[in-house]
Image: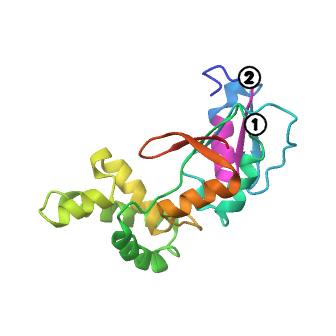
């Protein structure tokens, strides 16, 4: 965003490791990029002090304790001219697959992350190989982002198996309910993300 010409960028990060990484990456833009350690459900900025043009929240909000509260907190900073790039994990016809991995997650979420990375790599490898078989391959290609590459498949499984404390997949009906509750409408939609505006 700073490279694209943004005057100021505020990065809200919760974990110490994320703060360290973002500061290192944005070091040459330190006069433009401000990294704030906070929970997005409690953003420590005053409303209406600055004009927010774009909020970018992709692959984050489904990992919060209360998605409605977090989404509502973010939308408080939007004006009629603001854009909100947003997504959450949707079930999209893969409910049975998620039930199976959700059961496995009961145990794997307690595994240290370093080991979970290799377990998810192992699972991803076999899912990738089995995706070329008839019947089960169709189910796996529908349930995982296999056509987008091995790395994305691995990261998806890593997420599902417990790389985050909070995680849930939502139905389309639940998504629409969340958007109505916080008072935003869909301006554009792709397979993975929504562009939202104030309703």
Q: Residue at x 68, y 23 (%)?
A: 6
187 vs 152, left or right, is right
On screen, 186 above or below 91? Answer: above
Describe the element under mark 1 as helix, strand or loop: loop
Q: Quadrant of the N terminus?
A: top right
Q: Determine the residue located farthest toward the left in the rendered image.
A: 134
| Residue 197 falls within the magenta-colored stretch | no
Which x, y percent locates residue 63?
59, 61
198 horizontally vs 175: left or right: right
- Residue reaching furthest to the top: 5
Of marks 2 and 1, the one in the foreground: 1
Which residue has dot 2 on it?
Answer: 7
- Nearest the viewer among 117 and 182 is 182
94 or 10: which is nearer to us? 94
8 in magenta? yes
Residue at position x 88%, y 35% in the image: 49
Dot 2 crowding, Cα within 10 Å, few <14, some 14–19, many 20+: few
**Residue at 60% over, 21% down:** 4
Q: Position of residue 166 (x, y in %)?
A: 59, 67
Tell me the residue at 43%/61% (across/down).
158
* Residue that numbered label 1 is attached to: 79
Q: Choose the circle earlier in sequence order: 2 or 1.
A: 2
Q: Position of residue 154 (x, y in %)?
A: 37, 56
For the record, the magenta segment spans: 7-24
Q: What's the colour scheme?
A: rainbow
Q: Does the rendering let one see residue 117?
A: no
Which is nearer the eye, 195 or 104?
Answer: 195
| Crowdedness near tag 1: few (<14), some (14–19) or many (≥20) residues, C-alpha within 10 Å | some
């Amino acid at each position: 965003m700073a490279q694209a010409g943004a005057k100021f960028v505020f990065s809200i990060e919760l974990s110490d490791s994320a703060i360290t990484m973002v500061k290192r990456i944005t070091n040459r833009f330190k006069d433009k990029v401000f990294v704030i350690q906070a929970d997005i459900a409690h953003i420590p900025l005053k409303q209406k002090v600055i004009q927010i043009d774009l909020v970018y929240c992709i692959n984050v909000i489904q990992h919060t304790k209360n998605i409605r509260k977090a989404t509502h907190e973010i939308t408080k900073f939007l004006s009629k001219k603001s854009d909100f790039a947003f997504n959450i994990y949707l079930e999209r016809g893969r409910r049975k697959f998620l039930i199976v991995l959700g059961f496995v997650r009961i145990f794997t979420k307690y595994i240290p992350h370093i080991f979970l990375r290799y377990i998810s790599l192992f699972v991803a490898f076999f899912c990738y190989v089995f995706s070329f078989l008839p019947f089960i391959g169709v189910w796996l290609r529908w349930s995982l982002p296999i056509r987008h590459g091995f790395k994305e498949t691995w990261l998806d499984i890593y997420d599902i198996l417990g790389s985050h404390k909070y995680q849930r997949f939502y139905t389309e009906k639940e998504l629409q309910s969340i958007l109505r509750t916080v008072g935003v409408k869909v301006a554009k939609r792709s397979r993975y993300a929504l562009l939202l505006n104030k309703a």
